[in-house]
Structures are given as structure tokens and as C-alpha cells.
Amino acid sequence: MGIIIWLIVGGIVGWLASLIMKTDAQQGIILNVVVGIVGAFIGGWLIGPLLGAPSINEGISIMSVVVSLIGAVILLAIVNLFRRGRVR
């Protein structure tokens, strides 16, 4: 059941992050899910301890989704930096 939640939340978070970073037209659903899952990992590892927020593994809450979204936006900013030489 946990993997299904990761896929669903990862897809939603990845899609929202791609809308924020304006890369939605370049990504498909699979890349949105991957960005969301990796972003959740980055957010849970870096931002979660700073804010005292739980990760998606500990349960879905508003704060865990926000932490995952911040991690996904950071991931897309790093990808844009290496791909284009600047952050959009």
C-alpha cells in the first residue's frame, strides 16, 4: 500500500512542482512521478528536519506534502541550472 501512496502523491507533487517551475510542457506523467518521489526524498532528508515536519513515510499531512513539494521544486531548479545554465 505504501508504494501506491508514493506513486499517487509523487505524481501530484511532481505535477505541481512542474507547474511552479514552468516545465510542465516538457514532462510527461512518468517524469512527474519520478520528480515527485525524488523531491519527496530530498525534502524529507533536507527540509523536514529543519522545519520539524514529517516525511510522506510517516503519514500524509499538509506539512509532509509541502515539504515534498519544496524538495521537488529544488530538484527541478537544479536540473534547470545544469540544463540551461540558469534557474527559471
Image (cartoon, grey):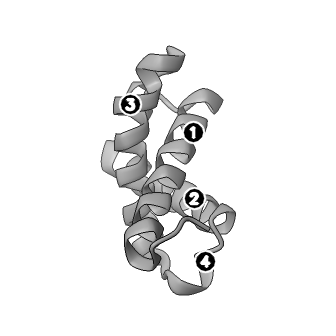
- CA–CA distance between discs 4 and 1? 19 Å
Q: Residue at x 55, y 54 (%)?
A: 13
Q: Nearer the viewer, mark 3 or mark 4?
A: 3
Name the side, left or right, on which 67 lies relative to 1: right
Q: Position of residue 71 (x, y in %)?
A: 47, 45
Q: Position of residue 88 (x, y in %)?
A: 62, 68
Amino acid on which disc 2 is placed: Ile
Marked residue nearer the N-terminal end (2 or 3): 2
Residue 24 disc label: 4
Residue 12 disc label: 2
Amino acid on which disc 3 is placed: Leu
- CA–CA distance between discs 2 and 1? 9 Å
Q: Nearer the viewer, mark 2 or mark 4?
A: 4
- Quick one: SS at disc 2? helix
- Quick one: SS at disc 3? helix
Name the side, left or right, on which 33 lies relative to 88: left
Marked residue nearer the N-terminal end (3 or 1): 3
- Label 1 sits on residue: 65
Residue 46 disc label: 3
Quarter assignment of residue 85? bottom left
